[in-house]
Amino acid sequence: MGTTPEGKIKEQIGKALTLLGAWFFKPVSKGYGRSGIPDFIACVPVTITRDMVGQRVGLFVGIETKAEGGTPTAWQDKELAAIESAYGLSILAVGPKHLDALASGLRRHGRCEERGPC
């Protein structure tokens, strides 16, 4: 059984999160959970600035993956926006081109362009 294009992206994102020392999981609703939850829920360790005491904290991250040309559903858009509203970081990773940008963006304390590639 072959891996789908989106499955390949998910595998690479899992490896990137592991390298960053993140805690993460991939929720599976099987029709019983809440619609639109991102493919990855993660807490990524980041260092806050000296102006913010210089301690390490965990950044809440929701990552939705799509194969090249894919778009999020209305429910997924709603959940990604809710994460942003709560000062978490939501990322839409479309295709393999976003993987390097994703890792570098998370290393930059999770600052991304408006829910696009980091």
Image (cartoon, rainbow, N blue to C red):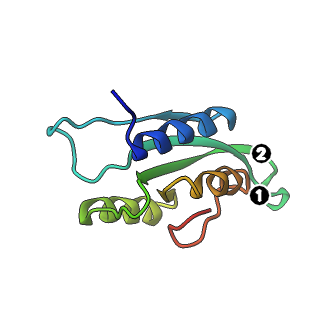
Residue 52's disc is 1
Q: Toward the viewer: 54 or 32?
A: 32
Circle 1 packing at 10 Å, graded few (<14), some (14-19), many (20+), is few
Residue at the location (66% across, 49% down)? 103
Circle 2 packing at 10 Å, graded few (<14), some (14-19), many (20+), is few
Q: Toward the viewer: 41 or 116?
A: 116
Badges 1 and 2: C-beta atoms under 8 Å apart? Answer: yes
Quadrant (top left, top right, bottom left, bottom right) of the N terminus: top left
Horizontal and vertical percent position of residue 41:
45, 42
Residue 55's disc is 2
| Side of 27 relative to 87 (left or right) | left
Residue at the location (41% across, 54% down)? 67
Q: Amino acid at mark 1?
A: Met
As drawn, which residue projects farthest toward the front?
2
Give the structural element (helix, strand or loop) at label 2: loop
Q: Is residue 8 above or below residue 68?
A: above
Horizontal and vertical percent position of residue 102:
62, 54
Q: Is residue 93 above or below residue 47?
A: below
| Side of 46 relative to 5 (left or right) | right
Quadrant (top left, top right, bottom left, bottom right) of the C terminus: bottom right
Give the structural element (helix, strand or loop) at label 1: helix
As drawn, which residue projects farthest toward the bottom?
114
Horizontal and vertical percent position of residue 86:
45, 60
As drawn, which residue projects farthest toward the left?
31
Horizontal and vertical percent position of residue 35:
22, 51
Residue 106's disc is none
Residue at the location (54% across, 36% down)? 14
